[in-house]
Image (cartoon, grey):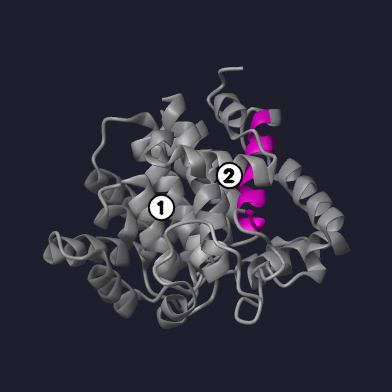
Amino acid sequence: MFNRAYGALVGGAIGDAMGMPASFLTRRQITETYGYIQDFLEPQKEIQTYHGDLKAGEITDDTMESVILSQVIIDHGGFSEAAFHEAMKNWAIRQKMLESTVIGPSTRRYLEALIAGRDPKLTAGQGVTNGSAMRVAPIGIRYHDDLGKCLEMAAASSLPSHGSKPAVAAACAVAAGVSLGVHGGYSPLDILRAGADGAAYGEKIGADVTSPLLSRRLRLVESIVDQAGQGDIREILDELVGIFGASMMSYESVSIAFGAFYATNGRGADGVLAAINAGDDADTNGAICGNLCGAYSGAEAFPAAWRKRVAETSGLDLETMARQLLGEN
């Protein structure tokens, strides 16, 4: 179980760091600039305007926010909204996140409200992007043995910043997938279907906005990938991206992450590379797919060199964090 919990965390960091150079590029731009990405690369500054100052293997705000949520859970024995607010506010001030270009619009509104002393929930219902889904894996780890509690806490962690129907659905879908993966004994199809069911749960909680239903998209992922059979992953990506897109919109991003996970049968390296090379919000899509693949296949599903690289560049002890999330120490 520890290996899968650690896999979820380190897989997210790997997907984040490896997808970083491709963030918000089209699939054609990725091919022309990098080829098919298969390792950590230096971002090409002339084309990578969001993360151009980072070095190969460095994580972004995706992993940082997941770590913040992890620490809140560890320190408080579970998710605490007040503690999460405080930790995110302190991080934003310390790292000058409002002066950066890397945070999404929903997270920006949330942090602006916190720093100004306003109630962030007043505007959270506008948040339809993937920020809560990209950080939610620690909840799936913590509540791996209680899916109902997992969904409840995933929704609670999303509502303060990403309170719309699609965003809450996305957080619940990812948490459910990670929860089943860490628990063990489930197939990739089981995890995909749990993600769809989790999305349906979240869609009943989030603020009503005009958007596609993620729950239906995830059920469509199953049929698209199954019809493709054992086809070339690039052709499957053509189909998935052509139908869903791969942007920071929660209903696009999480569809692509689950699609890459399911199309590669949860194989860590293959899944992450597929999600990254889908383009657009490549670092977040890679991080979410890495969470799912790592939870299902364990940390060894990623090359040791990749795990070592993100540990060195981030300075994070994700192994200890995984044990603490499981309540082992």
Q: Which residue is mark 2?
A: 309
215 left or right of 71?
left
Residue plotted at (65% across, 30% down): 74
Q: Is 73 placed above or below 215 here? A: above
Residue plotted at (57% across, 67% down): 21
Q: Quadrant of the C terminus?
A: top right
- The spot of residue 81 in percent (x, y) is 69, 45
Secondary structure found at label 2: helix
Residue plotted at (64% across, 65% down): 124
210 left or right of 64?
left
- The spot of residue 267 in percent (x, y) is 31, 46
Q: Which residue is mark 1?
A: 173
| Residue type at tag 2 | Arg
Q: Main secondary structure of the magenta part?
A: helix
Find the distance from the CA under tag 2 to the CA under tag 1.
29 Å
The residue range painted magenta reads 58-74
| Residue type at tag 1 | Ala
Q: Would you say residue 116 sits in the magenta stretch?
A: no
33 left or right of 295?
right
Mark 2, mark 1: which one is toward the viewer? 2
- The spot of residue 213 in percent (x, y) is 36, 69
